[in-house]
Image: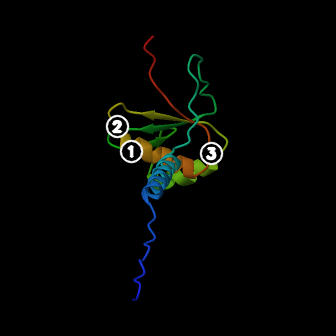
Amino acid sequence: MERRRRRRSASVDITPLIDVLFMLIIFFVLTASFSRGNIEVALPSGGGTSSEDGAVILSVEKSGRLLWNGLEITRGELAGLASRAAGREIMIAGDEEASYGNVAAILEILRKEGVGSAGLLMRGDG
């Protein structure tokens, strides 16, 4: 009589592997979301009066028009002016009805040109 051999099936429980994979996916998604989209702008500290002497005033009007120390410029000209003004503080005077997207795009241009010190001008209520 021939004896039948039972085949042993190799079973691997993959539940812990799926848990580890899920944790890795979460880690990489969170890491990617924290590492991009940061606009590095050094805002002036509150409480003291910020000296505007020697600072460049960049005005953003409601219509999106840009003024560099009172002179109208385009976004294309902004990059060149910002790179030449490296080391000087740039103060952004944005109209309260100006689009947030316009101001964010301007901050991104300044960041790309190496401007490390930019602040937002606000009116005093006092």
Circle 3 residue? 85
Q: Is 87 rendered above or below residue 14?
A: above
Q: Is 93 rendered above or below residue 81?
A: above
Instruction: State left or right for residue 62 relative to residue 8.
Output: left
- Is 112 or 81 nearer to us in this picture? 112
Circle 2 residue? 98
Q: Is 62 rendered above or below residue 14?
A: above
Q: Position of residue 113 (x, y in %)?
A: 58, 52
Task: Single out the residue that lies furthest toward the front.
Answer: 1
For numbered disc 2, what is the local secondary structure? loop
Q: Picture quarter containing residue 4?
A: bottom left
Q: CA distance from mark 1 to mark 2?
A: 7 Å
Q: Quadrant of the N terminus?
A: bottom left
User: Can residue 110 be seen from the camera position used here?
Assistant: yes
Q: CA distance from mark 2 to mark 3?
A: 24 Å
Q: Are marks 2 and 3 in contact (CB under 8 Å)?
A: no
Q: Are marks 3 and 1 in contact (CB under 8 Å)?
A: no
